[in-house]
Amino acid sequence: MKILYAATGDIAADLLQALYGKGLVKAVLTAPDAPGKRGKGLVPPPVKVKAEELGLPVYQPETLRSEARRHVREMGVDTLMSFCYGKIFGPMFLSLFENTFNVHPSLLPLHRGCSPIYGAIKDLDRVTGISVQEIAAGVDEGDVFASAEIPLDGTETAASLEETVRKMAPSVVLPMLEDFSPERKKAQEGAPSYTGFIGKDDGRLDFSLPFNVLHATVRACSPWPKAYAMLNGAPLYITGVWGSAFSEAEEASEAPGTIVCAVKGRGLKVATGNGYLYISKVLPPARKEMDALSYLNGNRAIIGSVLE
């Protein structure tokens, strides 16, 4: 195979390295460089940085229309491998390849779409995984060539689960390619679920909900967009929670959102609609992230206040 590797985020870097080590990658397709924070010029996608370290040619078209198709046709590639690339492949583009693969960080048909890691954590899944599918016209609807499970213990953040997927992807993809047969693909089974784009409002916490739902939201929104609630009229970002979302709820008697007390080794104890949430890290307005007890040391009056 002569692979065109289409990817953008850091999650895809280890698989690129592994495919390169097997001599399978001919070129890399990735997103254009994007403006950095606070006007610090253009920043290359992480996969571009890795590709250039490996000495691979990189192509960064704005669209995948006729000019891009012509350019790809001249590359001499015969296989498309996509992993969190960020653009939709049309039928004319896909027709350039003998085989197409998409690496998707979920057990399809669960969590189709652009935010599967967020979806698995937010939905309190006990297991997620990685699927290698054929690229189809519908989003993540293609037949599956290979898959592997990742058990979840209710403490994962989006960042830590992404790192697990990053490290695990080569062990799922390489064996599939080494013993590849198109006939081995299987149709997806079961009812599908879908994920969409994540925005700031997805991190808004409602403390009338059960503690495990809030626990999952904080972790699914870490490191972005960050979960938050309002405290005395200002947003307080909640960036860490103690324990597992799969533990049994304690009985709470206070109104939801009440900051009850501080517990050493756990953080701020907050009442929810069902049990208590222990907040271990916070990001106050115009401050740096800190552990919750350090925040309390300078804000003793928050005990008894209500997070809204």
Image (cartoon, rainbow, N blue to C red):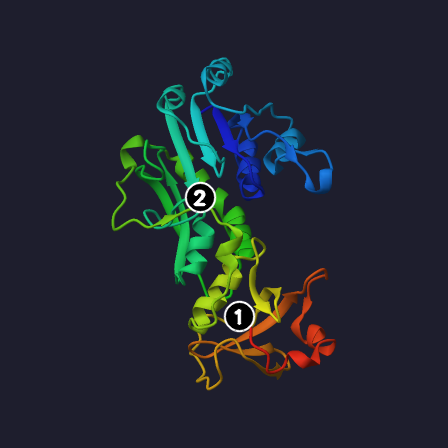
Q: How far apart are marks 2 and 1 (CA)?
A: 29 Å
The quadrant holding residue 31 is top right
- Whole-percent x and y of residue 98? 37, 22
Please name the amino acid that badge 1 sits on.
Answer: Glu
Comparing 134 with 238, the one in front is 238
| Image: 307 above or below 36 | below
152 shown above or below 81: below
The local secondary structure at tag 1 comes to loop
Above-or-below relation of 62 to 259: above
State if disc 1 and disc 2 touch (CB < 8 Å).
Answer: no
Instruction: Determine whether, in the image, residue 103 is placed left or right of residue 193.
Output: right
Residue 150 in view, yes or no: no
Q: Residue 112 carries which label?
A: none
Q: Badge 1 is on which residue?
A: 308
Disc 2 marks which amino acid?
Answer: Cys
Q: Residue at x 47, y 64 (%)?
A: 216
* Residue extending farthest front: 233
Horizontally, is 15 left or right of 274 in the view? right
Q: Where is residue 54 in the image (x, y as percent from the top left)?
A: 64, 30
Q: Which of 103 and 206 is in front in this view?
A: 206
Residue 273 shown left or right of residue 293 in the figure: left
| Closer-to-camera residue (183/300) | 300
Crowd around label 2: few <14 · some 14–19 · many ≥20 (10 Å): many
Q: Which mark is residue 114?
A: 2
